[in-house]
Image: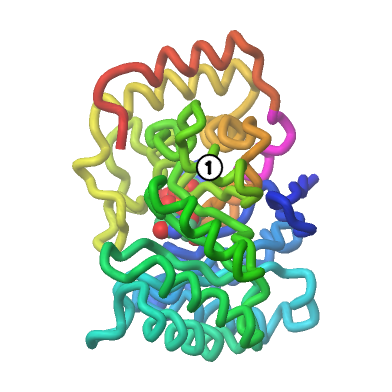
């Protein structure tokens, strides 16, 4: 059964597992598989879908496909769905198609709504700090997107910890508190969720923002699929996949093998244990999974049947993760 967590200091509950459409929903992918995954996820209680302007490829095609499925199969359920999109990475050619300026964000939000056939999104994110645009300009654009009725809430993604507080303060002062902070987090990438008061997770929690983790399986490295090399139908093998073959290192595969054994001793698959490990921290609102098939989705959904960890198992995991060469 799906578990729903309150999102920071807000009235919104999000499913512990959300579905992301970065890969596997673009124009290069099977539309039928995409549709089956989306409908199976919604049937299982996954009501939060995470998109961005540039998801595809082609950029924009994940939003187009999502809109097509929404219109054909889920139109009656819009009020039961929590849909996010983002702008900030390269999207369209030309000087305004990239970055976090007011011009780019507002134009991109309008384009996303048109592609998905929506009147509003539930969350609009600044996808990244672009290194140039003043924080005040980007945050004011988010505030104005909410004021114009095109989004209900706002979020930030991947902002460095030293800028996070500035974002929260600006948004709070302008009456549009930051609902969600989205960061990469998995067993091989732990910076955002590191222990202590200075991690992205700690700063988000301190400010009442919900926290949502992306790439929770390190794009597939935290599964058994790379135990015997790189299979043809895997993200590392695909020319359009973001996971590079050279990231599939012997050290990471060996660690995954050892983690797989720990997971088996808990009666779980490695993906299930890796997802549960993230959700174990009560400050984590949700984890965004990405799947390439319905069986993967079903596997991941079973995570919710066993979320608890003994101190001894956490220690075993920690000792595996302390090996050199795992960090991404
Ligand atoms: N804010 C940002 O900048 C940002 C960046 C990245 C991602 N995100 C969000 O986070 C979402 C998830 O990211 P992600 O796709 O990298 O997540 P992920 O869960 O780390 O990787 C997903 C991949 O893992 C494999 N997989 C998943 N479940 C499996 C299972 N049970 N058994 C075997 N393999 C399994 C599949 O690989 P194969 O394809 O090889 O089968 C799948 O494509 C994205 O869709 C997006 O919404 C946000």
Residue 120 lies, in percent from the top left, at 64, 83
Residue 301 forms part of the magenta stretch: yes
Whether label 1 lies within 8 Å of ligand 1 gets the answer no
In depth, the one of 186 and 284 nearer the eye is 284
Q: Residue at x 58, y 14 (%)?
A: 313
Callout 1: 10 Å neighbours few (<14), some, many (20+)? many
Residue 322 at x, y percent in the picture: 36, 17
Which residue is nearer to you in this view: 83 or 172? 172
Where does the N terminus fall, quadrant-wise? top right
Element under disc 1: helix
Query: Which quadrant would the C terminus be assigned to in this image?
Result: top left
Residue at the limit of the structure toward the top, as seen here: 312
Residue 204 x/y as whole percent: 56, 46
Q: Is residue 56 visible?
A: no
Residue appearing at x 63%, y 19% in the figure: 266
Q: Which residue is mark 1?
A: 203
Residue pictured at 30% horizontal, 77% vertical: 98
Relative to 76, residue 230 above or below:
above
Say which quarter of the image contains residue 175.
bottom right
Residue nearest the observer in this picture, 129 or 5: 129
Q: Nearer the viewer, residue 262 or 314?
A: 314
List the single residue furthest toward the left.
246
The answer to whether residue 235 is above or below residue 142 is: above
Q: Position of residue 210 (x, y in %)?
A: 63, 50
Which coloring applies here?
rainbow
Q: Does the magenta portion include 196?
A: no
Is residue 54 visible in this depiction of the protein?
yes
Task: Report the predominant secondary structure element of the magenta stretch.
Answer: helix
The number of discs equals: 1
Please name the residue shown 61% across and 27% down the image: 268
Q: Which residues are magenta?
A: 300-307
**Residue 152 picture quarter:** bottom right
């Amino acid at each position: 059964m799906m578990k729903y967590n309150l999102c920071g200091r807000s009235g919104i509950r999000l499913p512990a597992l959300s579905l992301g459409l970065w890969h596997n929903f673009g124009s290069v992918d099977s539309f039928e598989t995409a549709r089956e995954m989306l409908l199976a996820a919604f049937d299982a209680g996954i009501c939060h879908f995470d998109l961005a302007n540039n998801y595809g490829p082609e950029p924009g095609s994940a939003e187009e496909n999502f809109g097509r499925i929404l219109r054909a199969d889920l139109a009656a359920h819009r009020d039961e769905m929590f849909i996010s999109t983002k702008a900030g990475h390269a999207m369209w050619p030309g000087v305004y198609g990239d970055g976090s300026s007011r011009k780019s964000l507002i134009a991109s939000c309008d384009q996303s709504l048109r592609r998905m056939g929506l009147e509003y999104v539930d969350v609009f994110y600044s996808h990244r700090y672009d290194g140039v645009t003043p924080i005040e300009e980007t945050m004011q654009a988010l505030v104005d997107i909410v004021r114009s009725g095109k989004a209900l809430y706002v979020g930030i993604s991947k902002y460095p910890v030293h800028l996070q507080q500035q974002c929260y303060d600006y948004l709070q002062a302008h009456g549009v508190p930051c609902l969600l902070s989205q960061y990469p987090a998995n067993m091989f990438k732990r910076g955002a969720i590191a222990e202590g008061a200075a991690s992205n997770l700690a700063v988000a929690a301190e400010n009442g923002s919900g926290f949502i983790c992306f790439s929770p399986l390190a794009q597939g490295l935290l599964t058994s699929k790379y135990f015997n090399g790189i299979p043809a139908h895997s993200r590392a093998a695909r020319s359009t996949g973001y996971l590079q073959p050279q990231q599939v290192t012997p050290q990471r595969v060996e660690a995954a093998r050892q983690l797989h054994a720990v997971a088996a001793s808990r009666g779980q698959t490695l993906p299930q244990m890796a997802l549960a490990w993230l959700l174990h921290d009560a400050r984590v609102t949700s984890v965004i999974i990405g799947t390439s098939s319905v069986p993967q989705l079903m596997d991941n959904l079973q995570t919710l049947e066993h979320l608890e960890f003994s101190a001894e198992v956490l220690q075993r995991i920690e000792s595996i993760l302390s090996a050199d060469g795992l960090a991404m």
